[in-house]
């Protein structure tokens, strides 16, 4: 076994690829003032799930990124942009002990109908009628 001190270090190889720094959208569009009412500009700096993108991704300077973040927060506060966007998920069966599924009540049927509406698939009319009758019965009781 050789100790770490005795190992000779190889000189670091020069990286032949030079990393090109990203140019900001603000520079290319020659934007001087970032306004919270300019939703089209601000949506460029937001991901599909409404998260503010990093400086590393957008290529902004520190000052630009700070102004953009504040403008997006103001825009959300004024309800011009959403805080989050709803993402449809497909649910797997929720199993109890040994993977058994319990009885399905009206709430599970309602969830199934809502999920089908999100996915754009058709649901049998029978299920929707059954859910409406169970809701009416619970309100009367």
Image (tube, grey):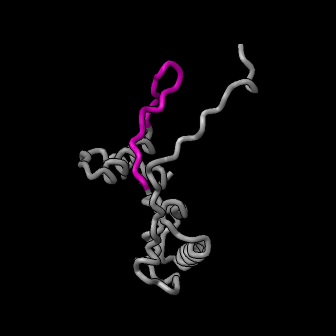
Percent x, y of residue 89: 41, 46
In the orientation shown, which residue stands out farthest toward the top? 1
Measured along the vertical axis of the image, is residue 13 above or below residue 70?
above
Q: Nearer the viewer, residue 101 or 6?
A: 6
Quadrant into which the N terminus falls: top right
| Residue at 46 percent of width and 64 percent of height | 22
Q: Nearer the viewer, residue 85 or 68?
A: 68
Measured along the vertical axis of the image, is residue 46 above or below residue 38?
above
| Residue at 51 percent of width and 76 percent of height | 79
Q: How many marks?
A: 0
Percent x, y of residue 102: 47, 29
What's drawn in magenta, residue-wise?
Answer: 87-104
- Evaluate whether residue 76 shows in this view: yes
Q: Nearer the viewer, residue 34 or 139?
A: 34
- Evaluate whether residue 77 shows in this view: no
| Residue at 48 percent of width and 84 percent of height | 37
Percent x, y of residue 57: 49, 60
Magenta stretch: dominant secondary structure: loop
Percent x, y of residue 45: 47, 68
Q: Is residue 94 magenta?
A: yes
Q: Is residue 56 magenta?
A: no
């Amino acid at each position: 076994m050789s100790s770490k001190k005795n190992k000779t270090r190889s000189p670091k190889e020069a990286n032949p690829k030079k990393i090109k720094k990203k140019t900001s959208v603000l520079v290319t569009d020659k934007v001087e003032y970032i306004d919270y009412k300019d939703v089209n500009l601000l949506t460029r700096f937001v991901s599909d799930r409404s998260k503010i993108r990093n400086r590393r991704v957008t290529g902004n300077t520190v000052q630009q990124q700070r102004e953009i973040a504040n403008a997006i927060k103001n825009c959300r506060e004024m309800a011009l942009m959403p805080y989050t966007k709803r993402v449809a998920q497909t649910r797997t069966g929720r199993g109890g002990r040994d993977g058994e599924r319990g009885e399905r009540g009206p709430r599970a049927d309602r969830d199934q109908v809502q999920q089908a509406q999100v996915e754009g698939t058709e649901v049998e009319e029978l299920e929707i009628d059954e859910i409406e009758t169970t809701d009416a019965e619970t309100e009367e009781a």
